[in-house]
């Protein structure tokens, strides 16, 4: 963690170095390429890219002015200052476009059309989506496709406001029964859940001996579910989140491999699929 907000919630972190290198490897940036980074953070990743490509080829944007100012100072001291600015990285940096490579180091819901508009045909985009890392290649203007890397990833979401879980109301609901083993859900289904319920949050409840007694799930629209390991489920809010869990549980009796998921982007739609584009799929939405 490299930054906390006034309530102590982490707002910036340095990514795990091995994940950072896996993403840079997937980016396959080469001499002569221009790169755009969403999420400057500490500036470390921007420094690595500047070292490889030359600072004048690297553009990095962070939404947080304090982080940008610190990163600029560090990169200046390091002696290689790329173009670093404050802004919503989802919108790219039109005055520096087009880019040959685009990397996001904060989790995205979709690849914003503005960012796609700043890519060339052949541009590689590497971005965390859900709890995975997607690598897509732009095949035509505003069209791209690719696959997820095998590496798990738990990136900070691109910042946005959200509702807190409503455990008070959920407690008052009549319980339904589920045949999905509650204790397995967060291990077995975490990745597909992150695609089907973008931005979902979870918590676990344990007894005094540390044994799991239940899990809670919620999304930013206020939908909340509380479960008990005895198979009781209580739900509230605009969406019935456990229905999605039941559905995914039927589809994935074992935890699926991230690399079996792909992503297709067209001007009208962004969609993640399992095994083949015509397989089970989930429509991504900007949220
Ligand atoms: C995992 S950190 C980035 C790590 C960074 N690449 C490094 O080398 O230290 C994620 C960063 O994304 C930034 N971020 C979140 N939402 C953003 C947005 N909409 N546009 C640009 N940056 C954003 C956060 O402020 C945070 O610094």
Image: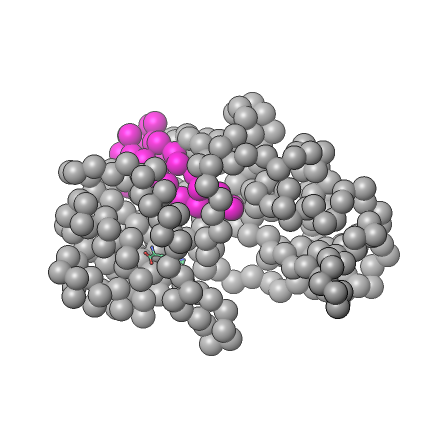
Residue 188: x %, y % from top left: 64, 42
Most foreground residue, 237 or 17: 17
Q: Residue at the spot x=72%, y=49% of the render?
A: 183
Ligand 1 is located in which of the four quadrants? bottom left
Q: At which x and y percent is residue 250? A: 72, 34
Instruction: Please check the rendered image and state whether residue 246 is part of the magenta-colored stretch, yes or no.
Output: no
* Residue 114 vs residue 257, the one in the foreground: 257
The answer to whether residue 175 is visible is: yes
Is residue 88 shown to the viewer in this render? no
The answer to whether residue 81 is left or right of residue 228 is left
**Horizontal and vertical percent for residue 133?**
44, 42
State the residue at coordinates (54%, 34%): 257
User: Which residue is found at the position 15% from the left and 48% from the top?
Assistant: 54
Residue 286 in the figure: left or right of residue 233: left
Q: Is residue 206 above or below residue 48?
A: below
Figure disc tally: 0
Colour option used: one colour
Considering every residue shown, the one lying at the far front of the view is 209
Q: Tell me which corner region of the image, top left, top right, bottom left or bottom right, holds residue 147.
A: top left
Location of the N terminus by quadrant is bottom left
* Segment colored magenta: 116-142
Position of residue 266 relative to residue 51, above or below, is: above
Q: Position of residue 130 (x, y in %)?
A: 51, 46
Does the segment drawn in magenta span residue 121? yes
Residue sitting at 47 percent across and 47 percent down?
A: 153
Magenta highlight: main SS: strand
The residue positioned farthest toward the bottom in the image shown: 6
């Amino acid at each position: 963690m490299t930054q906390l907000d006034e309530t102590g919630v982490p707002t910036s972190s340095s990514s795990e170095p091995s994940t950072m290198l896996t993403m840079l490897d997937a980016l396959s940036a080469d001499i002569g390429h221009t790169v755009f980074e969403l999420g400057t953070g500490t500036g470390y990743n921007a420094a690595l890219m500047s070292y490889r490509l030359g600072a004048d080829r690297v553009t990095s944007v962070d939404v947080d002015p304090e982080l940008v100012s610190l990163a600029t100072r560090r990169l200046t001291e390091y002696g290689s200052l790329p173009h670093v600015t404050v802004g919503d990285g989802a919108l790219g940096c039109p005055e520096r476009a087009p880019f040959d490579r685009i990397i996001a180091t904060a989790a995205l819901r979709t690849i914003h059309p503005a960012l796609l508009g700043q890519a060339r045909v052949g541009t590689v985009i590497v971005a965390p989506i859900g709890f995975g890392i997607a690598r897509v290649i732009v095949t035509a203007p505003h069209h791209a496709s690719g696959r997820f890397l095998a590496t798990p990833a738990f990136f900070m979401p691109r910042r946005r406001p959200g509702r807190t879980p409503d455990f008070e109301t959920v407690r008052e609901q009549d319980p339904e029964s589920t045949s999905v083993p509650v204790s397995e859900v967060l291990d077995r289904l975490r990745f597909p859940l992150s695609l089907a319920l973008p931005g979902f949050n979870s918590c676990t409840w344990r007894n005094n001996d540390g044994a799991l007694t239940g899990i809670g799930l919620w999304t930013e629209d206020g939908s909340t579910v509380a479960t008990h390991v005895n198979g009781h489920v209580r739900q509230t809010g605009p969406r019935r989140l456990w229905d999605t869990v039941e559905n995914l549980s039927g589809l994935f009796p074992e935890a699926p491999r991230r690399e079996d998921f792909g992503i297709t982007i067209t001007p009208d739609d962004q969609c993640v699929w399992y095994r083949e584009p015509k397989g089970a799929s989930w429509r991504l939405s900007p949220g």
